[in-house]
Structures are given as structure tokens and as C-alpha cells.
Amino acid sequence: MSVVVSPIREPLIEGGKTYHQITEDICSPTEKAPNLAWMIAFGLSSAFLGLYIFTVAWTIWFGIGTWNLNRTIGWGWDITNFVWWVGIGHAGTLISAILLLFRQRWRTGVNRAAEAMTIFAVMCAGQFPLIHMGRLWLGIFIFPYPNTRGPLWVNFNSPLLWDVFAISTYLTVSLLFWYSGLVPDFATLRDRSQGLRRKIYNAVSFGWTGSAKHWQRFESLALILAGLSTPLVLSVHTIVSFDFATSVIPGWHTTIFPPYFVAGAIFSGFAMVQTLMLIARKVLKLEEYITLQHIDSMNKVILVTGTIVGVAYLTELFISWYSGYIYEQYAFYNRVLGPYWWSYVGMMACNVLSPQVFWSRKIRRSIWWTFVMSIFVNIGMWFERFVIIATTLARDYIPSSWSYYVPTWVEIGIFLGTLGLFFTLFLTFTRVAPVVAVAEVKAILKAGGDQYVGPNAKPHHHHGHDEVSTEAHH
């Protein structure tokens, strides 16, 4: 298949790699003993994982009374964290599915880690509504299955039930997408290993041989799953926003929630991918595969979605004023100037103002700036969820029931613990599977390698290669 090569497009693979070098570079982190940086990171995340197990056990043993929820604020840190984690889980499928359908080559460096991140983030998110039930063992009642309880079924009118459907579907499709992409790479690892390790990789690679038939099926499946995932990216966070938008509480009952939640989810998800990829490329020495071009492209998406989120915030403020509805006006006045003003300022500063630095190409391509901004964005998106939930509930229609919510050590511990769970899973993943998709990087080598494209391309590479079309030279 001929590949159209742009003479001005920047290379996506640096270092003049051959196919063999790509295999060696990307597979070696899973085969060698972990380095010191990995060991330190794993030790830290495991400590937070221990905190997670302890605080969840404490909550189940002593009940939800260990949290600071009260009669006014029935949703606190738990639902804030739930929406935050679901949002982070959005970028992976977006990078894989939508960019695959649009044939964006730069996705190949980051899609594998982003898909893994999606799965781990959704696993972190799904626990919060379950723990929030108070009686965890009653979680079985949220699934609509034929039962012997007569007409007692789940409430299909409740967006909380739609959440169960949306998130379980999303997790299933993301898992399939991620795993099917891993199969060729597992087969590569199988062929490079011996003994028990070889048997395990043989089992998980499903007898992949790399025949033309296998590749044909592989690419068909990728396209089908991408087609299924794309509407899911939009639907999942839309349904999460319905948890708020279908209520009658001022500040929540707005039609702008679905699109602005989706934009916010992509915004926070891409920021988390940046955080992870910048650490991974340094620790696993993948700088030649996750290049400044990848980081630049990701930052452009962060800039666009951050601006959309900023427009949504200003639209909300304008509509609340324009509506002439005093309760709605008060809800927003309270957000901006009430007791939680600091969280609103944090949200605006981190989500609307900070991404604007990415208008500068120099900053977009700076590792240090990108890393700091990715952390800022995720702090800001956490504040956004907290502003929507806590500030709106803290002051409702009846002044006598107004209250101020501060989380207890148990709630803070569960949140920090889920970060530990997330990073422990991600670090374990980097040891058992290639963080960058080997097969997909090889597929773009002749269209994206620096010896074929860009300023350092060697002209003799273009002659005698059927893969590179002559269109690039006209």
C-alpha cells in the first residue's frame, strides 16, 4: 500500500529506526529488571493503595457516617471524585477511536497508554457510587435482571441507573478495544521469551501468527470497535451530566450540561494522558517514539477543549442572569462570591486561563510547561466538579438548612487511595505489555520516521521503495 509522504510534516519516530530497533526499544522495558525510578514510583503508589484498602474497609465497617455528608449535602467528595474519574477515562477511547477514524498518525505513540488509562480510571470511578450506597452488598439491586421479587424493578427513570448501563458498556467496549490492540504485541513478546513467560504470552495472544488473514481481521475489528466507541465517548459523560441536569435544583437544571461535560471530560482526560506519557517516556526511555510532535498535538486538543469549557462557564453565568429567575441567579452568585469562592477561582484559573498559554508554540513543545499545565488542568477539573456539587447543595431553598461541607480524613483517604490504585495498575501494565503499540508504530515508520520525512530525511530512502509514493516529490 503506498503512503503519501508530506515533505514538510514533522517526523513521529526519531533516531533513524529500523523495524528491529523499534521492537527492541519498546519491548525491552517489559523484559529487563525495572529501574530505580520505576521502583520508587511503584513503592509510592502501593503505599497509597494500602491507604485506599484501609479507608474503604473503614467506611464499610463503620458506615457512611464516617463521611461528613449531612441532610443538605448528600453528595460530597465521593460523587465529585466519581465524575472526575469518569472524565479522565474519556481521552483514551477518544484518542484511539476518533483519531483512528480520522486517520491521524500521531495517535500511534500515545493510544496504548491512553486506552489503559481509560480502563483503570473507569475502575476507580465505578467504586464511588457503590461505596456511596452505604450498604455495599445491595449493589446487586442496581442491575435490571429477572427476579423473584414480583414487580420490584430498578427505577428506569433515574439517571443513576442510566449511569450503570453507560459505564458498564463503556468499560466493556474500551476493554475489548485495548485488548484486541495488544494481541499482535503479545505475540511479539511470546516469540522473544522462554519458559512460563512464553506460555503465558502464548495464551493471551490467542495463537496470533501475523498472517494476512489475521491482520485483515484485526483491522476490521479495530474499525468496528472505533465506530462503536465514538458515540459512547459522547453518551457516557452526557448521561453522567444527566445525574444533575434532570434534577430541579437551581444551578443544575440546565441544558448546557451534556456538551460541556463532554468537552470537560476530553479536556481532563488529555491532561492526564500528558501527565502519564511525560513520566513514561522519561522512565522507560521512549523519547524517540513519544516525540515533541505528539506532545504538541495533544496540547492543541487541550487548548481547544479548555476554551470550549471556558465559553460554557461564561454562558452559564450569562443565562443565570438573563433568565430573571432569582433562585438560579442566587445559585451562581453563591458559586462566585459565596463561602466556596476559592474553589470557583481555582476552577476558572486552572481551566480557562492556564491552557491559554498553549497559544505559544514554544510552550506547547516544552516538556516542563506541559507537565505543570497537565497537573493544573486536572486540579481545575476536580474543582469544577466540586463547585457543581458542593456549592449548589450547600445553600438550597431553605436558609435554615444551609450548611458548609468539609471532607473527613476518610473521604480524603479514599480519594488519595484511588490515585494509588490507578498508578499501581498503570505501573504494573508498563511491566507486562508494551506502553507504545509496536505494530502500529511500525505501520507508520515509512510515513513518519525521521529518515523518510522531515528536514533530515535521506533522499536515497525514497527510491526503490514501493511503499513511499512518488506524489511526495511533485
Image: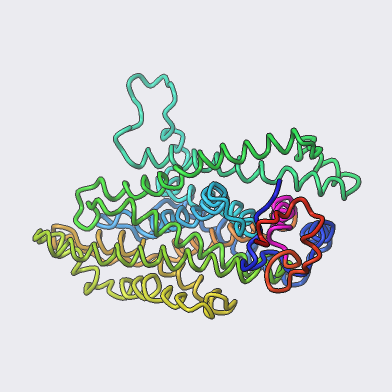
Magenta-highlighted stretch: main secondary structure? Answer: helix
Position of residue 174 in the picture relative to residue 40 (left or right): left
Q: Which is nearer the eye, 419 or 214?
A: 214
The N terminus sits in image quarter: top right
Determine if the magenta segment contains residue 444. Answer: yes
At a point 68% along the width and 34% down the height, the residue shown is 217
Position of residue 469 in the picture relative to residue 236 (left or right): right
Q: Is residue 281 above or below residue 215?
A: below
The C terminus sits in image quarter: bottom right
At a point 75% along the width and 48% down the height, the residue shown is 185
- Taking the image as drawn, is residue 425 in sight? no
At a point 51% along the width and 53% down the height, the residue shown is 89
Q: Position of residue 310 (x, y in %)?
A: 33, 67
Color encoding of the figure = rainbow
Q: Which is nearer the eye, 42 or 409?
A: 42
At a point 46% along the width and 34% down the height, the residue shown is 140
Position of residue 144 in the picture relative to residue 454 (left or right): left
Give the magenta-colored segment's residue range. 432-449
Determine if the magenta segment contains residue 64. Answer: no
**Residue furthest front in the image:** 474
**Residue furthest right in the image:** 195
Q: Which is nearer the eye, 347 or 74?
A: 347
Number of numbered callouts drawn:
0
> Which quadrant of the view contains residue 308?
bottom left
Q: Position of residue 171 (x, y in %)?
A: 53, 43
- Taking the image as drawn, is residue 200 in sight? yes
Q: Is residue 223 above or below residue 147?
A: below
Q: Position of residue 368 (x, y in %)?
A: 58, 79
Q: Position of residue 113 (x, y in %)?
A: 63, 56
Q: Which is nearer the eye, 466 or 339?
A: 466
